[in-house]
Image (cartoon, helix red, strand yellow):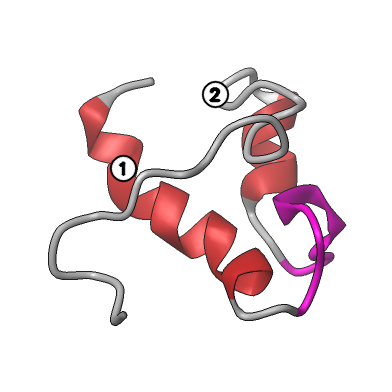
Amino acid sequence: MPASLFPCDYIHYNPVRHGYCKMPQDWPYSTIHRLMKLGVYPRDWGTTEQIEKPQGFWDD
């Protein structure tokens, strides 16, 4: 995945991180659906691996 999409990873995984859904694909308002259709993200993104925490983006 291009490094320029790294901040998008944070945005797409945020609903999971905060307990609103179990997988990023479950969040109906996410742009991840469009990016998956375009082939930017694989269909199983965020479901099989731990998403790396961006430096300075997430609080602990």
Figure quadrant of the N terminus: top left
Circle 1 crowding by C-alpha within 10 Å: few under 14, some 14–19, many from 20: few
Q: Quadrant of residue 54?
A: bottom left
The disc at residue 40 is 2
- What residue range appears in magenta? 20-29
On the picture, is 10 further left or further right than 57?
right
- The kind of secondary structure element at disc 2 is loop
On the picture, is 31 further left or further right than 58?
right
Seen in the picture, residue 29 relative to 49 is either above or below; the reply is below
On the picture, is 3 further left or further right than 13?
left
Q: Residue furthest left?
A: 56
User: Percent x, y for residue 39?
Assistant: 63, 18
Whole-number angstrom distance, CA of label 2 to CA of label 1: 12 Å
Seen in the picture, residue 42 relative to 33 is either above or below; the reply is above
The residue pinned by badge 1 equals 6
Figure quadrant of the C terminus: bottom left
User: Which residue is located at x 75 percent, y 44 percent?
Assistant: 33
Q: Is residue 50 magenta?
A: no
Q: Amino acid at mark 2?
A: Val
Which is more toward the observer, 5 or 60? 60
Q: Quadrant of residue 17?
A: bottom right
Q: Is residue 21 magenta?
A: yes
User: Which residue is located at x 23 percent, y 70 percent?
Assistant: 57
Q: Marks 1 and 2: in contact by CB < 8 Å? A: no
- The kind of secondary structure element at disc 1 is helix
